[in-house]
Each structure stands twice: as C-alpha cells, then as structure tokens.
Image: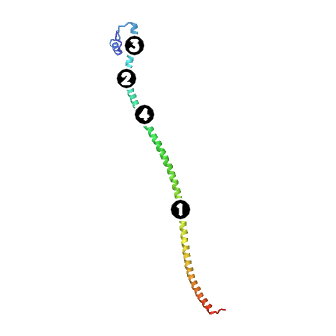
C-alpha cells in the first residue's frame, strides 16, 4: 500500500505506474476517489496559488491604503475645521467692512454738511465784514458830523454868550 500522507507523491505514483495499484476493490474505489480529490485539490491549489499571492499583496496594499486614508481623513477634518474658522473670520471681516463703509458714508455726509455750513458761514462773514465796513464809514461820517456840529454848537454858544451880554437884562 502507498503512503497516503503526501497526496502529490500518491498522484505521481499513480501516474507513473500507469494506474496499476495493488489494492482491493473497495479500498481501490475509496482510495482512488480520495486520491482523485487530493489530485484535483493540489492541482487547483497550484493554479490558484499565484492568484492567492496576488490577492494577499492587494490586501496588504489595501490595508496600507486604509491606514493612509485614515491619516488623510484626519488631515481633511483638520482642514475643514480650519476652513470653518477662516469662514467665520472672513464673515466677521465682511461685517466689519460693511460697518466701516456705513460709518464712512455717515462721515462723508457729515463732512459735506459741514462744508455747506462753512460756505454759508463764510458768506455770512463776508456780509458781516461789508456791514462793519459800511457801519465804520457811517461812524466816520457821524464823527465828522458830530465834530462839525460841536463846532457849530460852540460857535452858537459863543454867539449866544455875546448876545446875552449885549442884551440888557430886562
């Protein structure tokens, strides 16, 4: 009887001997079937071995990629968090820019109003200067008239004094 521990040896022995084994019919039938199953199994394993190795390589590669994917996902989550923070900051800056623009518009409106007020005051100032000049001229004329009047009053006072002295007392 053959050693059935190594199915490859059994299959090779069977092939070399031309299939002539010295086994009784029941054992031959059971042993032949076992040997055939072993031969098919070995043959299939030898066919599938390169595929199994390649599948193992692919599995190892996939495991490495899964680890890398985990690292990439962590980095992406960190970037998303940073983007959210940047978005909030940008929104705050936009709000600040809108407020600054509104303040600038108010300041410009106030500035235009102040310019109009200054122009009005400058016009009033010029009118006041003209009025002061005219009043000064009037005062100068009044002073001259007053001086002339005082001279006339003095002259009249002197004449009145002379007339009183010339008129006897009645």
- Residue occupied by mark 2: 49
The figure's colour scheme reads: rainbow
Q: Quadrant of residue 21?
A: top left
Mark 1 and mark 2 in contact? Answer it, CB < 8 Å: no
Label 1: which residue? 114
- Marks 4/3: CA–CA distance: 48 Å
Mark 3 — residue? 34
Q: Residue furthest front?
A: 169
* Mark 4 neighbour density, 10 Å: few (under 14) some (14–19) many (20 or more): few
In the rendered image, which residue does mark 4 sit on? 70
Quadrant of the snapshot with the C terminus: bottom right
Q: Are marks 4 and 1 in contact (CB under 8 Å)?
A: no
Q: Which of the two discs, 1 and 2, sits closer to the camera?
A: 1
- Say left or right for 138 vs 47: right
**Element assignment for label 1:** helix
Question: Is residue 96 found left or right of 43 in the rendered image?
Answer: right
Whichever of callouts 1 and 3 sits on the residue coming sooner in the sequence is 3
N-term mark: 1 or 2:
2
Q: Position of residue 53 (x, y in %)?
A: 37, 25
Q: Secondary structure at mark 2?
A: helix
Q: Residue 127, percent across and down?
A: 55, 71
């Amino acid at each position: 009887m053959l050693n059935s521990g190594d199915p490859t040896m059994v299959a090779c022995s069977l092939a070399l001997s031309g299939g002539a084994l010295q086994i009784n019919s029941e054992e031959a039938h059971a042993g032949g079937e076992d040997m055939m199953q072993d031969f098919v199994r070995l043959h299939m394993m030898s066919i599938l071995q390169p595929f199994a190795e390649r599948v193992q390589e692919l599995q190892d590669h996939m495991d490495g990629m899964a680890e890398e994917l985990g690292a990439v996902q962590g980095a992406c989550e960190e970037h998303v968090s940073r983007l959210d923070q940047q978005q909030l900051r940008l929104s705050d800056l936009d709000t600040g820019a809108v407020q600054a623009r509104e303040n600038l518009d108010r300041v410009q409106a106030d500035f235009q109003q102040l310019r109009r007020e200054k122009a009005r005051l400058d016009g009033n100032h010029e009118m006041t200067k003209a009025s002061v000049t005219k009043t000064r001229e009037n005062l100068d004329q009044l002073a001259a008239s007053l001086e002339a009047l005082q001279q006339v009053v003095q002259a009249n006072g002197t004449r009145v004094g002379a007339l009183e002295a010339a008129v006897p007392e009645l």
